[in-house]
């Protein structure tokens, strides 16, 4: 696993983003597993699945890094389908054997690459913080592999609430055009002709000759009438747009955790471990 002319250390591997052979993002590195005999990183867990709650084991054999990303020689689906092994701070020989078989790597004979000091099968120790090994583990025969710790110990665990977001459909909005009818009233000026009688006195001796007899005169009257017609004109553009609004939402859930207490020979409780309150 190249990083310049050397190898990446545990603290350099933590939180790197892993990519597969096609350059597709798999997830971020969660834990680094070192060989107990050599102290050299050999496995990492990569966070996959929804919200990164699943951790898949990936071998570092053939992997390369540019200091910002970890490129592994395996496809994303192969990593996601790796055998489920609890990231419980150690990787024993049987689990490592199954993982080797899944990835088709040498060393899948079940013996592992490292040996314990007592001759048992080698284990891998997880490191989830720079340079700090977590947990004390024993070999297959039950021998103590910790430094300065006894065999009679308990591992206290607790659940952590991980909260993320998912994008889901909550409703639909639509524009619909319908036709409605309304009454429109307006005022328009109109004119018409009216008849009035005009009388003028005829001067005597004029050129107008008077005749006795019946006669009539007719006048055509005109009037304007209000008429209507309809035309369709565009008046407005209407469209839908979405706007992202961020708000704070309170999320709660129940988690479990373990407490360790001790009792004397009379079965009376004396107190609790360092992670619990003293009584």
Image: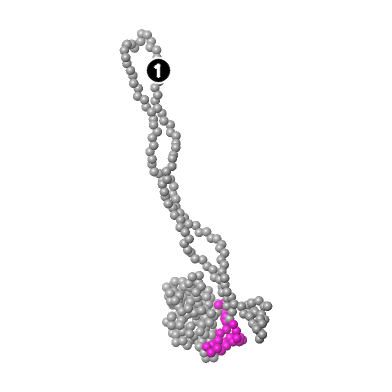
Q: How many marks overall? A: 1
**Residue 125's image quarter?**
bottom right
Q: Position of residue 55 (x, y in %)?
A: 50, 75
Magenta span dominant secondary structure:
loop
Query: Magenta residues, as a range?
Result: 128-154
- Colouring: one colour
Residue at numbered disc 1:
198
Choose between 88 and 156: the one closer to the eye: 156
For residue 35, above or below residue 243? below
Q: Which residue is drawn at 58% across and 86% down?
A: 146
Q: In which quarter of the image is residue 200?
A: top left
- Within the magenta stretch, is there residue 137? yes
Question: Is residue 266 within the magenta segment?
Answer: no
Q: Is residue 68 visible?
A: no
Q: What element carries label 1?
A: loop
Q: Where is residue 112 in the image (x, y as percent from the top left)?
A: 48, 86
Say above or below: 101 vs 202: below
| Residue at the (68%, 78%) spot, across then down | 279
Q: Residues within 10 Å of mark 1 (few under 14, many from 20)?
A: few
Vertical arrangement, residue 150 with respect to residue 18, above or below:
below
Image coordinates for residue 188, horizontal then vertical, percent: 43, 33
Q: Which residue reaches farthest bottom?
A: 119
In-image side of 78 versus 162 (left or right): left
Q: Nearer the viewer, residue 8 or 129?
A: 129
Q: Which of 254 and 173 is in front in this view?
A: 254
In the current view of this chain or complex, which residue is farthest to the top? 205
Q: Is residue 242 visible?
A: yes
> Residue 186, relative to residue 207: is it above or below?
below
Q: Which residue lies at the image location 34% right of the left edge and 12% below the top edge? A: 208
**Percent x, y for residue 54?**
50, 74
Query: Image check: 173 left or right of 253?
Result: left
């Amino acid at each position: 696993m190249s990083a310049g002319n050397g190898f990446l250390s545990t603290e350099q591997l933590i939180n790197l983003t892993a990519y597969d052979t096609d350059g597709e993002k798999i997830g971020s590195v969660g834990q680094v597993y070192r060989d107990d005999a050599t102290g050299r990183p050999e496995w990492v867990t990569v966070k996959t699945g929804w919200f990164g709650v699943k951790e898949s084991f990936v071998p570092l054999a053939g992997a390369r890094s540019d200091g910002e990303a970890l490129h592994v020689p395996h496809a994303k689906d192969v990593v996601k389908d790796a055998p489920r092994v609890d990231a419980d701070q150690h990787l024993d020989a049987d689990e490592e054997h199954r993982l080797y078989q899944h990835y088709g790597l040498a060393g899948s004979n079940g013996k592992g690459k490292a040996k314990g000091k007592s001759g048992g099968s080698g284990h891998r120790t997880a490191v989830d913080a720079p340079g700090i090994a977590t947990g004390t583990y024993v070999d297959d025969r039950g021998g103590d592999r910790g430094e300065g710790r006894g065999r009679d110990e308990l591992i206290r665990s607790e659940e952590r609430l991980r909260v993320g977001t998912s994008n889901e459909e909550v409703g639909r909005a639509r524009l619909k055009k319908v036709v409605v009818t309304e009454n429109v009233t307006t005022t328009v000026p109109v004119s018409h002709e009216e008849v009035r009688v005009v009388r003028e006195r005829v001067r005597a001796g004029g050129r107008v000759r008077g005749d006795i007899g019946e006669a009539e005169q007719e006048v055509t009257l005109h009037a304007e009438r209000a008429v209507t017609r309809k035309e369709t004109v565009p008046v407005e553009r209407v469209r839908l747009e979405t706007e992202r609004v961020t708000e704070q939402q309170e999320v709660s859930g129940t988690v479990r955790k373990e407490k360790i207490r001790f009792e004397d020979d009379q079965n009376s409780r004396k107190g609790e471990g360092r992670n619990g309150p003293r009584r």
